[in-house]
Image (cartoon, coloured by chain):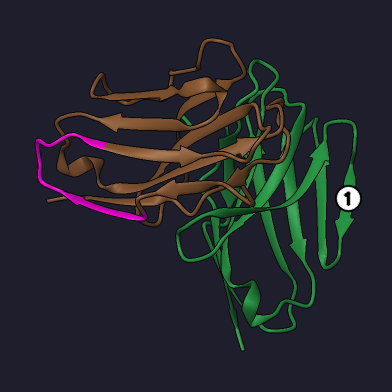
Chain colours: A brown, B green
Amino acid sequence: GAGVSQSPSNKVTEKGKDVELRCDPISGHTALYWYRQSLGQGLEFLIYFQGNSAPDKSGLPSDRFSAERTGGSVSTLTIQRTQQEDSAVYLCASSLNGRGTEAFFGQGTRLTVV
Amino acid sequence: SQQGEEDPQALSIQEGENATMNCSYKTSINNLQWYRQNSGRGLVHLILIRSNEREKHSGRLRVTLDTSKKSSSLLITASRAADTASYFCATDGNAGNMLTFGGGTRLMVKP
């Protein structure tokens, strides 16, 4: 595709429900990142995929958060038993081969837990 | 914890003035990047400077890097109202390949 695509754009969910956020990276990009951004704050690293290597999950805030990347392309971030503090914008980015190369961001998913 | 920290957190200037934002980081890097974010959504890449470079230009943007001080600066010359946005630095860190972002500088350019 032309750019990184994230869906849905907005998601409102009830506390305790599970949510899935999707990211379609740029075709051919081997590196994929997930970040979380609370209102007016910086980007909090969540997870990083690079090719066939084991993902770097060091940023996931709790075991309620998980992510997978199927076939080295589409990625899904899952949040189980959502809490109000999970409300944020979740940003996905991809880059050609990681190694600090330019990252291309999607428009994010704004998650609101009520 | 964030690798980079921007300073100042917020900056308000008049159109036509120059805007300078600073970034400090903690560990060794391969390169440092600056990004811009409008309206709290996707970030757009502005410029990348490698660890062996000291200065780089792109249009009205000038980036400097001082690896001895672990710091970088972004200068926007002749600012315009359309430059109003948040600006973030990002470093890769040679311990891993992921990008780590700072807290950002919120720039407001008044017409």
Which residue in the protein does label 1 denote?
A: B56
Asked whether residue B28 appears in the rendered view, the answer is yes
User: Which residue is found at the position 35% from the left and 49% from the top?
Assistant: A38
User: Which residue is found at the position 71% from the left and 43% from the top?
Assistant: B33
Measured from the top left, where is residue B108 in percent x and y? 56, 74
Dividing the picture into quadrants, the one containing residue B21 is: bottom right
Q: Residues within 10 Å of mark 1 (few under 14, many from 20)?
A: some
Q: Which chain carries label 1?
A: B
User: Which residue is found at the position 63% from the left and 77% from the top?
Assistant: B82
Measured from the top left, where is residue A34 in percent x and y? 47, 34
Residue B42 is covered by the magenta coloring: no
- Seen in the image, is B100 located left or right of residue A102? left
Residue A10 is covered by the magenta coloring: yes
Measured from the top left, where is residue B111 in percent x and y? 62, 89
- Seen in the image, is A60 located left or right of residue B40? left
Dividing the picture into quadrants, the one containing residue B89 is: top right
Question: Front-most of B101 and A69?
Answer: A69
